Amino acid sequence: MTQENFKSPLLTVDSVLFTIKDNSLKILLLKRKNSPFQNSWALPGGFIDVNRDDSAENTASRKLTDKTGVTPPYLEQLNTFSSKSRDPRGWSASIAYFALIAHEETNLKVTPRNDESAQWVDVESLMDETANYQPLAFDHQQIFQFALERLKQKALYSMLPVFCLPKEFTLGEYHTLIEIILGKSIQKKTLYRRFEASNMFEETGETVATGARAAMLYRLKEDAELVNFERNLG
Amino acid sequence: MTQENFKSPLLTVDSVLFTIKDNSLKILLLKRKNSPFQNSWALPGGFIDVNRDDSAENTASRKLTDKTGVTPPYLEQLNTFSSKSRDPRGWSASIAYFALIAHEETNLKVTPRNDESAQWVDVESLMDETANYQPLAFDHQQIFQFALERLKQKALYSMLPVFCLPKEFTLGEYHTLIEIILGKSIQKKTLYRRFEASNMFEETGETVATGARAAMLYRLKEDAELVNFERNLG
């Protein structure tokens, strides 16, 4: 049996790009210019360009860079969503990624050729299926929810969410970030102990004023490796 | 930009099917009849049949059932491997799955149309790149190692490996299974406490003789849900 006997499925890449903005967790959505799902909001993505992309991860990264002007510092494959019915154009598979970025470092842009609007959309508002932006194109609601679940799980045992913060940040900002993602209170002491134990960060030597006190700014060490903890945050 | 501008990549599915046999962890390999990689050993898989398969998971399950005669009781998507160079026929993506089965319940068969040989191959022997069966076709060595890592991780915090055992099994068999997968000693007491706490199993009422004593046979409850524990096995 050879490939010639088979009609090829469509193969796309879609990414759920998270950031923290205005004290809430948001993802990047684009308004679709073309059918199918014209004028619906969708995750950034598209077809693999076999002449240009070495791998699907390259496609995901390229599409995100096109939209935001920068390469997200964290990109991870999530899951591949496939079925005969998820795309009206035919049997289709989408390799989904989740990515994190500091919105301050992006430069959201709309190319003249393709005037999709791009928006940072509050994750909370996407949980309500009657709200603005809904329904999302294709099975993007399902992909988004899969990604959100993964991010919340990882926030419990890894330092991963730090990639939503600017390059220099305070412990207080890190604490707020984790509480926003998990949607619950986390003891500062526990979190700071992990921060320290991860050995991923270093003081910049600079401080910022936070109320009456000055807070140290931290940054990732150059050779930092992402640390996973054995126990979940309580 | 529409699909018509793009050459479609090849899209396949490959599965790493684990079992426990002769006190060792094994995976199913098939000898390739056709090029590319003719006569090399490969993971069971193939092209998605858009006229037949509702999803890639259907393809994976169908291919495994074709080869073993039964549907594996556990099948999980692993990762999608894609690149312009992994398949000499062109840009290719393979959606990889990992699956577990009790070898006693399979009926490995070779179809007359397609006389690939099928073998349960010891995982240990696949770690040695100069051994028999090597080198595997495509990037199947990489897919296998990714799957093995996932299985080992999951064995630390989930009851998942139980799907490598026959429908009725003893606690002793379960203990041996976990030690084989992890490659180290695990306290019986700890393991049995988890087994109990998972609430996934029930006594069959039957026992088997093990040395001087009779050991109870257990089976999955009908409505059992896979339980994950918060802490890894020590």
Image (cartoon, coloured by chain):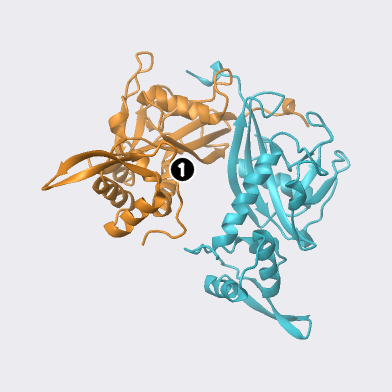
Chain colours: A orange, B cyan
Q: Residue furthest front?
A: A205
- Report the front residue among B16 and A122: B16
Element type at mark 1? loop
Q: Quadrant of the C terminus of chain A?
A: bottom left
On screen, residue B173 above or below B35: below
Side of A229 where A206 appears, left or right: left
Residue A138: percent from left, percent from top:
45, 35
Side of A156 where B125 appears, left or right: right
Q: Residue furthest bottom?
A: B212
Q: Is residue B169 visible?
A: no
Residue under label 1, please give it. Answer: A225
On screen, residue B68 above or below A88: below
Residue B193: percent from left, percent from top:
55, 75
Q: Residue at x 15, y 42 (%)?
A: A209
- Report the front residue among B20 and A172: A172
- The local crowd at label 1, few if under 14, some if 14 to 19, many if 20 or more residues have their Cα within 10 Å, is few
Q: Chain of mark 1?
A: A
Q: Quadrant of residue A115?
A: top left
- Report the front residue among A70 and A46: A70
Q: Quadrant of residue A9?
A: top right
Q: Residue at x 36, y 35 (%)?
A: A101
Q: Residue at x 36, y 43 (%)?
A: A201
Q: Quadrant of residue B113?
A: top right
On screen, residue B154 above or below B14: below
Q: What amino acid type should be assigned to the residue bearing mark 1? A: Glu
Q: Residue furthest left?
A: A212
Numbered circles on residues, count: 1
Side of A209 where A219 appears, left or right: right
Residue B99: percent from left, percent from top:
66, 52
Q: Quadrant of the N terminus of chain A?
A: top right
Q: Is residue B154 visible?
A: yes
Residue B160: percent from left, percent from top:
60, 61
